[in-house]
Amino acid sequence: MAHSAASNTGRLLLAAFRALLVLTVVTGLAYPLAVTGIAQAAFPDQAGGSLVKADGREVGSTLVGQTFNLKGTDRPDPKWFQPRPSASAYDPLSTGSSQLGASDPTLLKTVAKAKRQVAAFNQVPESEVPKDAVTGSASAIDPHISPEYAAIQVKRVARENGLTVPRVRKLVDAHTGGRTAGFLGEPHVNVLELNIALQRVAAAD
């Protein structure tokens, strides 16, 4: 009786080990490799991280925001369209919002200060500064801004690059995406793509 019970236990353990081995190979190796291969073949750009190249080198990803500061400083460069604030300084390894509530005094002071700075930087009234210009996204690496935020930057960018306002405004319009499927999300502008287009136009003049 004892020998039979031990034998049954042994067979069960062996069957469990075999199942573990098969599932490990299938779900841990075969499935990820198959999905990766299909993604690389069908959607090579997205599978590769949606990287963007300019002048023959990679300058970022359309999925991850970045700063456009004066070299060696943390001050925004007036030549470029600027992204929304980021709690992580656009570090993709440190995503997440500030976790401050809408009524938190610290957040209110931060937003009020940011609104004054954005208004002064773009030489517009504070009433024209949109919400996304002074508040970060939940991920802290949102690559998009609203068309309204892009619009208040047009005159500054045009002046700093020696371009006309209509020409820069046309660039913004050309890089404004609509709602997904016509009803999801909000219209948006990818800052990196817009700045690359701006660089090309400015260099051509």
Image (spheres, rainbow, N blue to C red):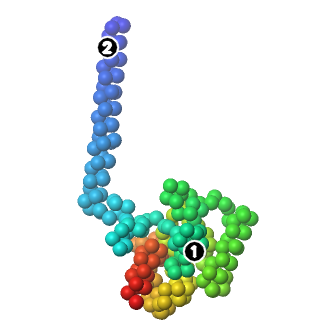
Q: Mark 2 points at which residue?
A: 7
The residue type indicated by label 1 comes to Pro
The residue positioned 47% from the left and 74% from the top of the image is 191
**Residue 159 sits above or below residue 147 on the image:** below
Residue 76: mark in rendering: 1
The 10 Å Cα crowd at callout 2, few under 14, some 14 to 19, many 20 or more, is few
Q: In which quarter of the image is the C terminus?
A: bottom left
Q: Distance between the residues labelled 1 and 2?
A: 73 Å
Q: Which mark is residue 150?
A: none
Q: Which residue lies furthest to the front in this view?
A: 72
For image coordinates 49% across by 58% down, the residue present is: 92
Q: Which of 48 and 132 is in front in this view?
A: 48
Is residue 3 visible to the viewer in this orientation of the structure?
Answer: yes
Residue 144 in percent (x, y) is at 49, 72
Q: Measuring from the top left, give residue 195's x and y in whole percent.
A: 45, 77
Where is residue 132? Give x, y as percent: 58, 73
Q: Which residue is painted at 55% across and 68% down in the image?
A: 72
Proximity of marks 1 and 2: CB atoms separated by less than 8 Å: no
Say few, some or many: other residues with alpha carbon within 10 Å of mark 1 (under 14 / 14 to 19 / 20 or more). Answer: some
Q: Quadrant of residue 51?
A: bottom left
- Could you tell whether 50 is left or right of 169 in the image? left
Q: Is residue 54 left or right of residue 80?
A: left
Q: Is residue 43 left or right of residue 89?
A: left
User: Residue 94, relative to residue 17: is it above or below?
Assistant: below
Closer to viewer: mark 1 or mark 2 = 1
Circle 2 SS class: helix
Residue 173 can be seen, yes or no: no
- Viewer-side residue, 72 vs 104: 72
Instruction: Choose top left, top right, bottom left or bottom right for residue 56.
Output: bottom left
**Dot placed on the residue nearer the N-terminal end, 1 or 2:** 2
Q: Residue 32: where, in percent of width, then height?
A: 32, 48
